[in-house]
Image (spheres, rainbow, N blue to C red):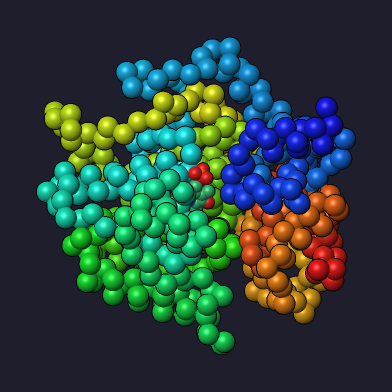
Amino acid sequence: MSNEDWLGRSRAAVWHPCTQMKHLERMPPLAVARGEGAWLIDHDGRRYLDGISSWWVNLFGHANPRINAAIIDQLGRIEHVMLAGCTHAPVVELSERLARLSGLGHAFYGSDGASATEIALKMSFHFWRNRGRPHKTGYVSLQNGYHGETLGALSVTDVALFKDVYAPLLRHSHQVISPDWRLAEVEESAEAYAWRAIAQMQDFLAECADTTAAVIVEPLVQGAAGMAMYHPIYLTRLRELCDEYEVHLIADEIAVGFGRTGTLFACEQAGIRADFLCLSKGITGGYLPLSCVLTRDEIYAAFYADATARGFLHSHSYTGNPLACRAALAVLDIFESDQILARNRVKAARFNQLLAPLAAHPRVRHLRHLGMIWAFDVTDVDAGFSARFHQQALARGLFIRPIGNSVYFMPPYVIEEPEMRLMAEVALDLLQAL
Ligand SMILES: *Cc1c(COP(=O)(O)O)cnc(C)c1O
């Protein structure tokens, strides 16, 4: 079967996510036959560098031998068993290790990022209810924030393209200005701007804390906003405000967790611990759908009682799937044995050097970098820029999908110098061509 055959059958049978299907007439998807490290390979054997880690999930490459081996070993033991009324070694071990690494515990599992958001929102509300404060039902989030697309998660998301159509179905939530440093005034530092942004959050909490259950934020980087980055002081101060006003802090580290920002979890850079930590995406190295919400002992204790209804009765069929948990354990093993965070620092420094010509390009604005995320905005673009950039990069062997006029790189951690060069060169070329 050729690429063309698979594309035709896919168009007829598969409804692709985040896609206007009619556009596939002009912009066919990539028919991937297999993967190898940082590369995707189509049915003609053409290779494409996975410059965005398959939507930010892949950490250690495709077909990683160690993760493969862990899953194969688990397959011979138990592939899945329900987690209500049963337990198993992979879920216990993973929960223990995540607790040690995050300083939070009581791991509650879901299947996707959006389900982790739902779990955190529900838990926060239910905690206040169990504590005799049922009026705390509201949520506050950041402008341009993204927390997933199921109805509850979409309610706290602020991306018009995904949200506006469904507005009649959504519960109202409040948004305050983003600390995204691109919004700073000329001469205003990222830190000064973060202080200005947090003032609006404080004003909101001062007025509405009585009816607010939680603040939800993407720590340090707002991914779907185009890799908007902000100063950690915002989170440090937000933690203080949440304590002062008795509102939970939900850290949505679905995209930024597992080393993306240079530390295992982004909150570490602000020296804070959230009340709820939402994890997914990189948790299984991009292998299997798994998400997890970790929380504090005090929150867990508010649910611990004789009355069934005081408990957190939420569930998904695949909660704590053993194969996914084994993949996650293999990922944590690789982090430790290969000293990934230290190695990534060296790689990032090298990629920064390779990006110097791009930084100097007159169409490049707000070149930004944190950990293993790079982004820049392109001036003088039209509505078709992102799609054309994607297509032309593909023709040059790079799979990358700009968000509006923001081009970003979020490569798997197995990236090496030749691949970094390819990303830097293709991006620079396309700035001349498009
Ligand atoms: C991707 C993402 C989600 C949603 O995760 P899904 O697995 O796509 O449902 C939520 N929050 C953030 C910050 C994300 O990047």
Q: Quadrant of residue 354?
A: bottom right
- The residue shown at (26%, 39%) is 300
Q: Quick check: 279 above or below 203? A: above
Q: Quadrant of residue 10?
A: top right
Residue 96 position within the rendered picture, expressed as x and y whole percent measured from the top left: 42, 32
Q: Is residue 144 left or right of residue 345?
A: left
Q: Quick check: 212 above or below 323? A: below
Q: Nearer the viewer, residue 228 or 107?
A: 228
Residue 71 can be seen in this image: yes
- The residue shown at (85%, 65%) is 429
Residue 382 position within the rendered picture, expressed as x and y whole percent measured from the top left: 70, 71
Residue 122 position within the rendered picture, expressed as x and y whole percent measured from the top left: 30, 44
Residue 375 position within the rendered picture, expressed as x and y whole percent measured from the top left: 66, 64
Q: Is residue 241 left or right of residue 396?
A: left
- Which residue is situated farthest in the top direction here? 76
Residue 341 can be seen in this image: no
Q: Quick check: 398 above or below 87? A: below
- The quadrant of the rendering that contains the N terminus is top right
Q: Is residue 85 left or right of residue 389?
A: left
Q: Nearer the viewer, residue 341 or 408?
A: 408
